[in-house]
Amino acid sequence: MTDARPNYPGRLRAFNLGLLLVLAWGLWSDLPAAPFSENSLTTIVTSRLPVRLPPLSVQASLDAYTRNATSGGPGKDGIPAIDEPRFISADQADKFLDPNDVVFGVVSSWAAKAYPQRILVWHEIVNDQFDGENISVTYCPLTGTAVGFKRGGTTLGVSGNLINNNVVMYDRASDSLWPQILATAVTGAHKGESLQEFRVIWTLWKHWKKKYPNTTVLSTDTGYARNYRRDPYGSYNPLGGYYTEKQPPLFPLMHTDARLKPKDIVIGARDEAGAIAFRKSALREKKIIHGSIAGTHYTAFYEPGLDTAYIYKNPARTPFSYRQGRIENGNGQWQAEQMPLERINAFDAMWFAWAAFYPKTALYD
């Protein structure tokens, strides 16, 4: 077992509530040391790291992002990625997980994995294998974002820096720096290139297990001594601490946007044309919402079983209706994750973080 002694003062000193500060500081400082591929992607491999062609849209200069980087407290790898993950069965995970605990799910046509938020909050990156590919499942607790990346022959680590409160990753092949939400390198050999992504679903353990009873689950046997029953930032079950609207973002932002409350949850997507976001509570209510980026039509479909949504390009503006958990029109019926359209990767995010990276984002609610 690794016995590292990380020191995590920076993020925790930024909390406004004294009680939460004391709790979090104590937890950290006392420690011993889907369909899997989105069909719109073109891939090349440089330095063993898959990147996307064309790269994703960015709405500021790359140098502006680097100028706005700040230390999150721990240094490089001070928050240690899990490089040798172990997995257990769903029944075994029931001994550790509460039905309402948040998990991050990955699924293919024949396999499913769940990564508990209460583990990822201490590590932020899991370098894993799935569906025959090397992948990284990443989570930033400060922005509420879980995103999957293909990593080729290298691995990803936590750089210790933040941009717009979002974790900045680095790849161990080139040491390029990649803000998670941006998915585009802001420094290094890959500067200006975008990682290839895959869908990671933010949901509850009870929902994931019901839909995928044969799922495997990331084990607490990570090789590190951590209290995986405690979250140093607060709680999602029940909602508390940093994750509530009462707590503002901890670090400076490049842009703010008052169209929604800072901690409102959106499901956002971006491609080479721009960025689009749908308020999650509106998707729950309306089930289908249409929007556009630069003249191209997009449609978001809510999936109630996992409390998530999928976003597709819909250039023909094909109409659909929602009925009893299925989406239909005159040509057939579909599940939200299997629409006959071009799907683009999407993920949950706190509004303040999405808007900080994408100030020109389209927003639909």
Image: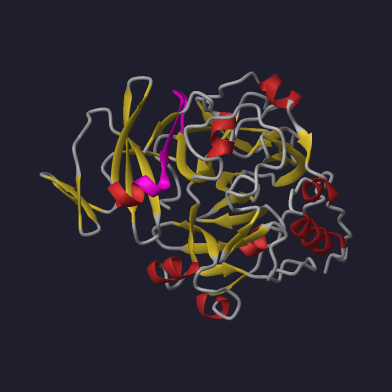
Q: Is residue 298 magenta?
A: no
Q: Position of residue 201 (x, y in %)?
A: 47, 54
Residue nearer the viewer, 330 or 356? 356
Name the residue at 66% across, 36% down. 179
Give residue 169's position: percent from left, percent from top.
70, 41
Q: Residue furthest left?
A: 330
Residue at 23% over, 55% down: 326
- Residue at 78% across, 43% down: 72
Residue 75, placed above or below residue 216: above
Q: Residue at x 65, y 43 (%)?
A: 248
The verdict on residue 277 being magenta is: yes
Question: Would you say residue 318 is visible in this rendering?
Answer: yes
Magenta stretch bounds: 270-282
Here the colouring is: secondary structure
With respect to residue 176, does 246 lie above or below?
below
Taking depth in this image into account, of 196 and 122 the one nearest to the observer is 122
Task: Give the vertical position of 76 relative to 202 (above or below).
Answer: above
What x and y, as percent, mark residue 147? 56, 46
Write down the quadrant of residue 181 in the picture.
Answer: top right
Residue in the foreground of this view, choosing between 185 and 72: 72
Numbered label tally? 0
Q: Is residue 214 left or right of residue 243?
A: left
Q: Note whether residue 44 is visible.
A: no
Quadrant into which the N terminus falls: bottom right
- The percent position of residue 104, horizontal first and vertical second, equals 53, 58
> Residue 285 vs residue 275: left or right?
left
